[in-house]
């Protein structure tokens, strides 16, 4: 495969000028989230119909010459699964992106079941991609040739793929659905850590009692410190599920921790004593102090609870329509949006338009149907 590596500031500035003349470019990223505490973009792949470029941001001092390219709304940027890439480019380089077309999102709105790039390339172009490099360390230098070729393959077919998918979306009258979703997608941003307790990011935390939450919070904070010190991702220190189980059972000593069989011998050797000490500290804290920082958010007010019968009606309508269109119900209209509709009980298109995340494509295509479901329920 032919590709050109861009690893100097001068080469980047030169290629940025050339790319500004294009109408469509394909973009992909490779990062090192599997290997480091603070992930970073390690490669930026850009392809046109004529060129395949591999940009090395770890060797280039200044990527500001790329900002106008990505910001230029006259140039369409093709991604496959853009969410992570959009967030990462803004996080690392303050690059904002206008005019996105996400081929994975397009596949989803076409009702394609397997939307991973490897599956789509195999289906559309009979091209096989070896995904074994997906989880490699992209921060290593020099990169092996086979890894660079893998990275280049990710963008090689995207422009052609986008053209095919756009035609199919037009036939189904769904292109403007995808375009609007892509417009929203271009505005997503990386969310840095805030002052909220770490346990709130753990699935199912509301089912834990105060003491378990207190233990879990201490263990999660310790994991962050250990991961930062070792420059390793959090999951390679201790898994969240393991910490959640430990916080529930609260072993009193190393032997009890071993019997749980949620940590390896190596993890117990490295972190066991600290884990037991943190459990004891959390259990010794006054209940009043524990509840101050660990009390989960109050349950929604009963006045804002949706009518369960209306929710059932809306879900049946949603599921039936999604089935007719052969797309995932959650993509068509997720449960959170249905709940908002049921709570606010709109009686007109204007009031329906005020609901967060309704979006114009739903409003224009299905607004009257939604209102009819509400009217019939009344």
Image (cartoon, rainbow, N blue to C red):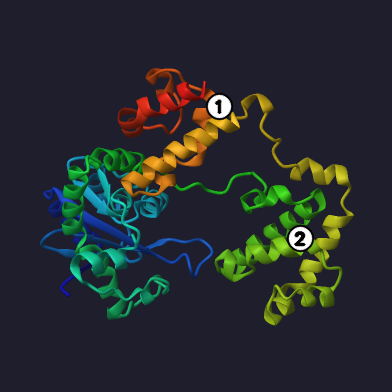
Residue 3: image location, x then y, percent: 18, 70
Q: Quadrant of residue 148?
A: bottom left
Residue visible at 12% across and 60% down in the picture: 49
Q: Which residue is mark 2?
A: 247
Between 243 and 113, the one lying in front of the other is 113
- Between the C-alphas of marks 1 and 2, the distance is 36 Å
Residue 182: image location, x then y, percent: 31, 43
Q: What is the residue that sits farthest to the front in this orientation?
A: 376
Please indicate whether residue 314 sits to the left or right of residue 326 in the image: right
Q: Which residue is mark 1?
A: 343
Q: Report how many numbered discs are placed on residues in the image.
A: 2
Residue 170: image location, x then y, percent: 18, 43
Residue 248: image location, x then y, percent: 77, 60
Give the numbered dot on residue 1: none
Residue visible at 40% across and 42% down in the picture: 320
Between 192 and 374, the one lying in front of the other is 374
Q: Is residue 369 above or below residue 6?
A: above
Please indicate whether residue 277 sits to the left or right of residue 271 in the image: right
Mark 2, secondary structure of its residue: helix
Q: Is residue 7 visible?
A: no
State which mark lies toward you, 1 or 2. 1
Q: Pointer 2: residues within 10 angstroms few (<14), some, or many (20+)?
A: many
Q: Pointer 1: residues within 10 angstroms few (<14), some, or many (20+)?
A: some
| Pointers 1 and 2 in contact (C-beta within 8 Å) | no
Please indicate whether residue 181 sits to the left or right of residue 16 in the image: right
Q: Quadrant of residue 298?
A: top right
Q: Earlier in the sequence, mark 1 or mark 2?
A: 2
């Amino acid at each position: 495969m032919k590709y050109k590596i861009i690893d100097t500031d001068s080469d980047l500035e030169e290629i940025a000028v050339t790319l500004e003349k294009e109408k469509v470019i394909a973009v992909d990223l490779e990062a090192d989230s599997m290997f480091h505490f603070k992930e970073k973009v390690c490669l930026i792949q850009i392809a046109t119909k004529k060129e395949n470029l591999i940009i090395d941001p770890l060797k280039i001092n200044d990527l500001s010459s790329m900002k106008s390219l990505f910001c230029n709304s006259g140039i369409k940027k093709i991604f496959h699964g853009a969410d992570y890439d959009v967030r990462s480019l803004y996080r690392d380089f303050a690059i904002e992106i206008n005019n996105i077309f996400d081929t994975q999102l397009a596949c989803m709105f076409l009702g394609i079941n397997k939307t991973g790039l490897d599956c789509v390339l195999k289906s559309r172009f009979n091209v096989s991609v070896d995904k074994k490099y997906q989880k490699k360390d992209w921060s290593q230098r020099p990169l092996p040739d086979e890894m660079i070729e893998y990275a280049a393959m990710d963008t090689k077919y995207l422009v052609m793929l986008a053209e095919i998918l756009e035609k199919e979306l037009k036939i189904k009258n769904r292109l403007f659905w995808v375009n609007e979703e892509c417009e929203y997608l271009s505005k997503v941003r990386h969310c840095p850590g805030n002052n909220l307790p770490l346990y709130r990011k753990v699935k199912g935390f509301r089912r834990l009692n105060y003491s378990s939450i207190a233990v879990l919070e201490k263990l999660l904070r310790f994991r962050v410190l250990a991961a930062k010190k070792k420059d390793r991702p959090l999951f390679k220190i201790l898994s969240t599920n393991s910490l959640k189980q430990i916080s529930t059972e609260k072993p009193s000593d190393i032997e009890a921790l071993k019997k749980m069989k949620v940590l390896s011998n190596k993890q117990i050797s490295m972190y066991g004593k600290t884990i037991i000490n943190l459990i004891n500290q959390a259990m010794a804290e006054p209940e009043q102090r524990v509840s101050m920082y660990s009390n989960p958010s109050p349950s929604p007010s009963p006045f804002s609870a949706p009518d369960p019968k209306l929710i059932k009606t809306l879900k049946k309508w949603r599921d039936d329509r999604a089935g007719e269109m052969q797309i995932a119900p959650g993509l068509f209209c997720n449960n959170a949006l249905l709940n908002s509709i049921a709570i606010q009980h709109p009686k007109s298109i204007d009031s329906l338009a005020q609901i967060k995340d309704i979006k114009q494509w739903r409003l224009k295509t299905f607004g009257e149907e939604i209102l009819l479901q509400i009217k019939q329920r009344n």
